[in-house]
């Protein structure tokens, strides 16, 4: 299933509607799974120490 209604979008891999990404995944389902795994992994990390303000 297509997530975006785009043709020849420079932000997508050629011939697909999958956004270019750092890990090079060109299958939307694989990219979705990877993003979910990264989200769950990062969500378990503690917040950084310090003042959580704009400068930080």
Image: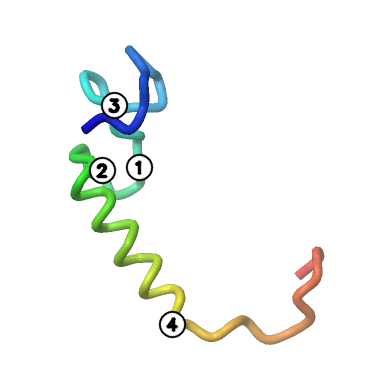
**Which residue corresponds to the image point at 80% horizontal and 71% vertical from the top-left?**
53
Residue tagged 1? 21
Residue 43, compared with residue 26, is above or below; it is: below
**Is residue 1 shown left or right of residue 49?**
left
Q: Earlier in the sequence, mark 4 or mark 1?
A: 1
Residue 24: which disc? 2
Q: CA distance from mark 2 to mark 1?
A: 5 Å
Considering the numbered disc 2 on the image, is that residue within a helix, a strand or a loop?
loop
**Is residue 47 shown left or right of residue 28?**
right
Residue 17: which disc? 3
**Which residue corresponds to the image point at 28% horizontal and 51% vertical from the top-left?**
32
Cβ–Cβ under 8 Å for marks 2 and 1: yes
Residue 44: which disc? 4
Q: Quadrant of residue 9?
A: top left
**Which residue corresponds to the image point at 75% horizontal and 70% vertical from the top-left?**
56
Q: Earlier in the sequence, mark 3 or mark 4?
A: 3
Q: For the residues carrying marks 3 and 1, which lies nearer the camera in this image?
A: 3
Residue 55, compared with residue 43, is above or below; it is: above
Residue 19, compared with residue 5, is above or below; it is: below
Q: CA distance from mark 4 to mark 1?
A: 23 Å
Cβ–Cβ under 8 Å for marks 2 and 4: no
The residue carrying pointer 3 sits among few (fewer than 14), some (14 to 19) or many (20 or more) residues within 10 Å by Cα, namely many
Q: Earlier in the sequence, mark 2 or mark 4?
A: 2
């Amino acid at each position: 299933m297509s997530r975006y209604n785009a043709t020849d979008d420079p932000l997508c891999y050629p011939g697909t509607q999958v956004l270019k990404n750092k890990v090079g995944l060109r299958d939307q389902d694989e990219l979705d799974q990877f993003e979910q795994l990264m989200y769950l992994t990062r969500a378990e990390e503690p917040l950084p120490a310090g003042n959580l303000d704009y400068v930080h």
